[in-house]
Image (spheres, helix red, strand yellow):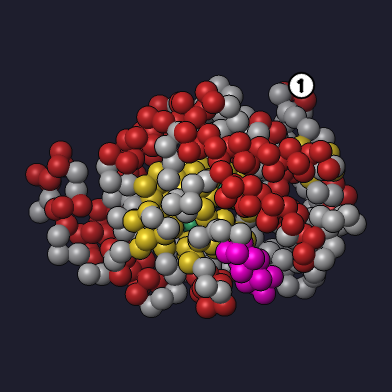
């Protein structure tokens, strides 16, 4: 059995394989964060295509946590009801539906990427965004959105919104809840000294900067059933070595404390906090971060970034560099990447294919 198709159980959840569709914003909602036909077909195709886990895009836990007005949301029961047919379809294909729970923090209230990615003014439908420390916001081209320094009530509201969103995700049929704490969005903004200059119990020391992520993870775990796993996506480093920033050593420490709170897997990405980041992409570019967290803790890790070939993904598991492989852009280029992997890595390609498509298997 190739490593990519070997068993992996997280709590009581058995994964069909170790390939996951990485969360990818589609900016395709037309009505207040509700999924459209686009989401159904997009996520459904990847489930047909053999992904073990199909994860939604960053899904906002409250309206002001959306990057753009087109982002998916889970802040009302109506959202949960609308997502249910999607999770049911993924499960019918043998996949595991997962949701990434997100708050965009000071990166919210923007135009969609294909409309320029620039801030929306209030008369264009823009909204006030939440930030740990507006003054620490990195340099920015163009107008800034109105920024609010998160006070105690805002922080409690964010924790509550994550907890409620997790409850609704469960109602919607998701099997995995992932807390998005990477890429310069709200939770990462608290983690990193680059964007957090607070002097209260949410800023300063490692303990204080990690408090919100720990509180959010604990709140999600509180309502997420014991038999189902919780993931946390972090940026393993800010890639800003020349200044005080978030780095791999802190990531290892954080991973340990998240494991103690009941997280089951750390999904290891990187960057996104500041435009000065020094990062070189390429195949497996973030894998060393995942591997270091795996080696330094007892928690499972997911590796992501620059994985484009089934053999490459298989080798990451085989060589014990990661427990799970998340694939983003290659799953956009080839929705059937999971079936391709079954063809290249197993002797029984046909059984991975949907029965409706088996006449196409050579
Ligand atoms: C992303 N990425 C991303 N990450 C995340 O945590 N939440 C998200 O909603 C998004 N949205 C998103 C949209 C699109 C169109 C792309 C291409 C990427 C990052 C993504 O999950 C992944 O980590 C990176 O793309 C690196 O992996 P690949 O693409 O090299 O496999």
Q: How many labels does the image show?
A: 1
Whether residue 337 is visible, yes or no, is no
As rendered, which of 182 and 77 lies closer to the eye?
77
Where is residue 32? Give x, y as percent. Answer: 59, 24
Residue 256, image quadrant: bottom right
Q: Residue at x 73, y 28 (%)?
A: 126
Say if the magenta span includes residue 258.
Answer: yes
Whether residue 319 is visible, yes or no, is yes
Q: Which residue is drawn at 73% across and 60% down?
A: 210
Residue 266, image quadrant: bottom right
- What's the magenta bit mostly, secondary-structure-wise? helix
Where is residue 95? Give x, y as percent. Answer: 32, 47
Is 72 situated left or right of 316 in this image?
right
Residue farthest toward the right in the current orientation of the protein: 199
Residue for badge 1: 123
Is 47 situated left or right of 70 in this image?
left
Q: In this view, does 287 lie above or below 339?
A: below
Q: Give the range drawn in magenta.
A: 248-260
Q: Quadrant of the C terminus?
A: bottom left
Say if the magenta span includes residue 335.
Answer: no
């Amino acid at each position: 059995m190739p490593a990519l198709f070997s068993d992996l159980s997280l709590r009581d959840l058995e994964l069909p394989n170790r390939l996951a569709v990485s969360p990818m914003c589609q900016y395709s909602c037309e009505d207040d964060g509700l999924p459209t036909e686009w989401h159904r077909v997009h996520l459904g195709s990847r489930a047909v295509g053999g992904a073990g886990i199909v994860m939604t895009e960053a899904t906002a836990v409250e309206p002001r946590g959306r990057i753009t007005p087109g982002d998916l949301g889970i802040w009302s029961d109506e959202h949960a009801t609308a997502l249910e047919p999607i999770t049911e379809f993924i499960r019918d294909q043998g996949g595991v539906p997962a949701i990434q729970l997100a708050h965009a923090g000071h990166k919210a209230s923007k135009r969609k990427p294909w409309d320029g990615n620039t801030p929306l003014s209030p008369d264009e439908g823009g909204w006030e965004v939440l930030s740990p420390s507006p003054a620490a916001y990195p340099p920015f081209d163009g107008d800034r959105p109105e920024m609010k320094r998160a006070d105690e009530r805002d922080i409690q509201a964010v924790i509550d919104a994550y907890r409620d969103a997790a409850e609704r995700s469960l109602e919607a049929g998701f099997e995995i809840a992932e807390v998005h704490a990477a890429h310069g969005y709200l939770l990462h903004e608290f983690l990193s000294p680059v964007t957090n200059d607070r002097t209260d119990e949410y800023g300063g020391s490692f303990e204080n900067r990690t408090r919100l992520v720990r509180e959010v993870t604990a709140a999600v775990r509180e309502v997420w059933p014991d038999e189902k796993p919780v993931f946390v996506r972090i940026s393993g480093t800010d890639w800003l070595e020349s200044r005080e920033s978030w780095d791999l050593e802190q990531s290892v420490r954080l991973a340990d404390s998240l494991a103690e709170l009941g997280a089951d897997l750390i999904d290891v990405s990187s960057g996104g906090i500041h435009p000065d980041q020094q990062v070189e992409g390429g195949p497996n570019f973030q894998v060393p971060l995942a591997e270091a967290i795996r080696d330094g803790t007892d928690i499972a890790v997911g590796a992501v970034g620059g994985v484009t070939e089934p053999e490459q993904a298989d080798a990451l598991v085989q060589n014990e560099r990661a427990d799970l492989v998340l694939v983003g852009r290659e799953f956009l280029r080839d929705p059937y990447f999971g079936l391709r992997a079954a063809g290249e890595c197993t002797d029984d390609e046909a059984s991975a294919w949907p029965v409706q498509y088996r006449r196409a298997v050579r």
